[in-house]
Amino acid sequence: VKDENGKRSMGFGVTQDITEIKRAEERLRSTMGQLSMAMDMATLASWELDLDTSTFTFNDQFYRIYATDAKREGGYQMSSMEYFRRFVYPEDYDIVRNNARNTTLPTPSIGYFQFEHRIIRRDGEVRLILVRSANWQSEDGKHRKSFGINQDITEMRRAEEELRRSREKLNL
């Protein structure tokens, strides 16, 4: 507030206690960090597919499983056809194509669709992934998405095969 001479004579301010907001932000940061670490340990990566544009959105964890990064792939978004071309093992095209049709179906009672297929990582290594996804549609029906996770299960399948072979030898 200025006096009759135009000089400041008084001021007003508002103070707000944001302690709880800052605590909530810190808890969220901590939880997100723990979730990220758990996903890394489980070799899990999340993704989102906009069904209207056939565009995937990936994250850094996704690219780590595929032995690449967002810079090399041109960002965090990629068309489904481009993903298919870059990463799906050619002999598994039909598996992926057939399961892509699930995006037109209601999510099953177990809460998600699930299938396995091979990928070719950027380093050339062929790996096996488990895909789980669920569909979502906005109330107005204008936006449709599929959300999911990919988990690298290569080592688990190798261990299962080794166990099977060991059992066969024991039985002999």
Image: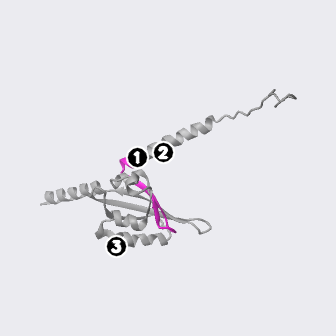
Q: Amino acid at mark 2?
A: Met
Q: Amino acid at mark 3?
A: Asp
Viewer-side residue, 61 vs 34: 61
Say which residue appears at 36% left-offset and 56% top-offset. Answer: 151
Residue 9 on image: x %, y %: 81, 26
Which residue is disc 2 drawn over?
32
Contact? badges 3 and 2 (CB < 8 Å): no
Rendered image quadrant of residue 132: bottom left
Most extreme residue toward the right is: 4
Q: Amino acid at mark 1?
A: Ala
Residue 38 on image: x %, y %: 40, 46
Rendered image quadrant of residue 156: bottom left
Identify the magenta region. Answer: 37-57
Dot 1 crowding, Cα within 10 Å, few <14, some 14–19, many 20+: few
Most extreme residue toward the front is: 5
**Tag 1 or tag 2, which sits nearer the N-term?**
2
In the image: residue 27, left or right of residue 100: right
Dot 3 crowding, Cα within 10 Å, few <14, some 14–19, many 20+: few
Q: Which mark is residue 94?
A: 3
Contact? badges 1 and 3 (CB < 8 Å): no
